[in-house]
Image: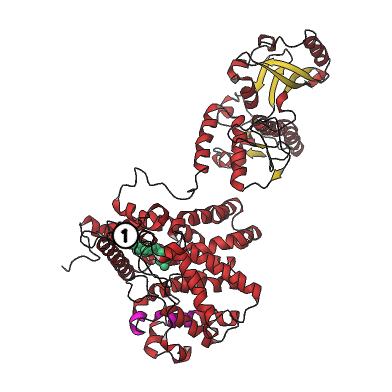
Amino acid sequence: MINVCLCFPFRSIRAVTSSENTVIVAVVKRPDREEASVMPLIKSGFNRRYVENPNMMACYNELLQLERGEVLAQFKLRACNAIFTALEQSQEAIEITNEDQVIQYVNPAYESIMGYQQGELIGKEITEVPKSEKNKPDLLETMNSCIQKGKEWQGIYYAKKKNGDSVQQNVKITPVIGQGGKIRHYVSIHRPLHDQNKAPRLPRLQLVFLSRQFPEKIFLSTHSSMARIHSMTIMIAPITKVINIINAAQESSPMPVAEALDRVLEILRTTELYSPQLGTKEEDPHTNDLVGGLMTDGLRRLSGNEYIFAVKQPHLPSHLAMPLSLNDIPPHVAQTMENEDSWDFDIFNLETACLKRPLTYLGLKIFSRFGVCEFLSCPEATLRSWLQGIEANYHSTNSYHNSSHAADVMHATAYFLCKERVKQSLEQIDEVAALIAATVHDVDHPGRTNSFLCNAGSELAILYNDTAVLESHHAALAFQITTRDDKCNIFKNMERNEYRTLRQAIIDMVLATEMTKHFEHVNKFVNSINKPLAALEENGGIGDEESVKGILTSPDNRILVKRMLIKCADISNPCRPLELCIEWAGRISEEYFAQTDEEKRQSLPVVMPVFDRNTCSIPKSQISFIDYFITDMFDAWDAFADLPNLMQHLDNNFKYWKDLDERKLHSLRPPPE
Ligand code: AMP
Ligand code: ZN
């Protein structure tokens, strides 16, 4: 780029990223007296001075000279950077000398193979570096006479490592001819001979090593001896590929990098890649208890206690025979649902108006708004029966996990499905799956956590091997209830393949509500969707429609969007208007207190000791829940779906809990003045 600058300052030119390759020309007035020094111009960043000249041809000639001179040179220099990067990353050991055979450069692979640091070699004549006595005496002579004539030499050569060991190498030395046909440099490429016919050694992965030609494949050695290579190629998991690539990079990395990569490998080899480790920072007992209570599965908390939760037969509502219709919803109930498309919709009004059966009523309205019956080819009466059947299997005795929570999650799901970005990403089958998943996601919840069920040795925990016990049960029971009776089988008229796709999506979403996977789902969403979208926006504005669409609609990413959507809907209560948020906080706290009471009664381990009704600070527990689970997740979801109203509520609510906590209050609300 040539920039002709007529006025100071030219910071705006230097500020652009391409300015390092810019030639900036100062156009100055013809000096009326003595020629002034160019030094001040050079110091302030100009590359050239050009004396003002009204003659067009003179200007044009100057530009031509610049293009062929300075600009071309800059391009060459830029290419040099790329070439040096290639040298640094090459696995071949490379050494460059000048025409007098003074070493000018060795790459990291050379350092690692020969055991020298760059600084010990650069500036030394090649003859000063010890040669192995194993070389035949006439070898050096032949080699020198060949390369000094400008010819390439290749052959087997013994080099001495710094520690005195000899290594047999295949060496290729290429003279580089410069201006005037003179030899300016010699480039030597060394390949240790034991590496010639097999892959580079990967010391950290016994038995498995990488092929230089086919880095995507690994070869298995049948013996621990590296010499015997079995030719069988096996499938390789992505994480193994990553570990192999890091291992290979370590081979040619300087010590500090290799050590840092060791730490990376240590982390990669754990299974809990997405869960932040609670360390010294997280000493707050509320966070510890919430994390312990929600994020551990039973395997780490088995008590051997034989409390049994029965896997009961699903409950059949007696009034199934006379389903109500969307048209005959009582007016006072219909009135409470008028603003169901608004985030500030008050679900507790509906709960009271419909005598604690909000899931059926809200379900009828929302499913009809999304055309679910049309999509499933199912009569409205079947949908009604289904909603009633599902709602009947929620426990109205739970203070939190009852059908109002399911209706609340369905409401949030419908709200998110209307956001522009979500609509761009999902198809109608995804929308239908999301609404059904939200409806069933906590069905038959016993009002106790997974840890409790495992500790109690409940029948469900035994059935599901202490792994995602509740979520597996919710998903399985939902399909049992649905398919057991044609009257409420909303899937009955679906084409088989479409049903399988829908079923898979519903199961995946219900399982995604399990809190042990919280950070995995959030991080995958951010890494696969938010970051690539942000990178696109940074590079070319939002103009690159095709690339944006590619990110939003890829099958893998659609799964991540759906998981994030139901997770955010499930724990969106801290983002609701303050009064609703307080009500939900009271309900979940009461359910936790009831669990602690029961754990004490049954002499079970107390999973979340801070949730003791006599001592618990509800504001502190909400602050911890928001800090640990909510803030980052909703930041990411807001960045994607654009939800300023939710973020505003979250901020207000957080301040509300902080204020109570600062006043040392433990209750849901301040005492009346
Ligand atoms: P789910 O059981 O599907 O509703 O999963 C959500 C989890 O988050 C449950 O374990 C709830 O107990 C927990 N949770 C939701 N809201 C809150 C809240 N305001 N405070 C503490 N825990 C909550
Ligand atoms: Zn839930």
Residue positioned 49% across, 48% down in the render:
273
- In the rendered image, residue 549, in percent from the top left (x then y), is placed at 63, 61
Magenta residues, start to end: 349-366
Horizontal side of 379 relative to 327 (left or right) equals: right
- In the rendered image, residue 484, in percent from the top left (x then y), is placed at 53, 80
- What is the chief secondary structure element of the magenta stretch? helix
Horizontal side of 279 relative to 538 (left or right) equals: left
Kind of residue indicated by mark 1: Gln
- In the rendered image, residue 78, in percent from the top left (x then y), is placed at 67, 34
Above or below residue 473? Residue 222 is above
Horizontal side of 274 relative to 112 (left or right) equals: left
Q: SS at mark 1? A: helix
The residue that label 1 is drawn on is: 622
Residue positioned 45% across, 87% down in the render:
320
Quarter holding the N terminus is: top right
Residue positioned 62% across, 33% down in the render:
202
Specify whether tag 1 is near ligand 1 (CB below 8 Å).
yes
Residue 346 visible within the image: no
Residue 328 is inside the magenta segment: no
Q: For the view shown, which residue lies furthest in the top direction?
A: 137
Residue 365 is inside the magenta segment: yes
Bin the neighbour count of mark 1 within 10 Å (Cα to Cα): few under 14, some 14-19, many 20 and up: many
Above or below residue 319? Residue 628 is above
Residue 481 visible within the image: yes
Name the foreground residue: 536 vs 412.
412
Q: Quadrant of ligand 2?
A: bottom left
Visual colour scheme: secondary structure
- In the rendered image, residue 149, in percent from the top left (x then y), is placed at 84, 15
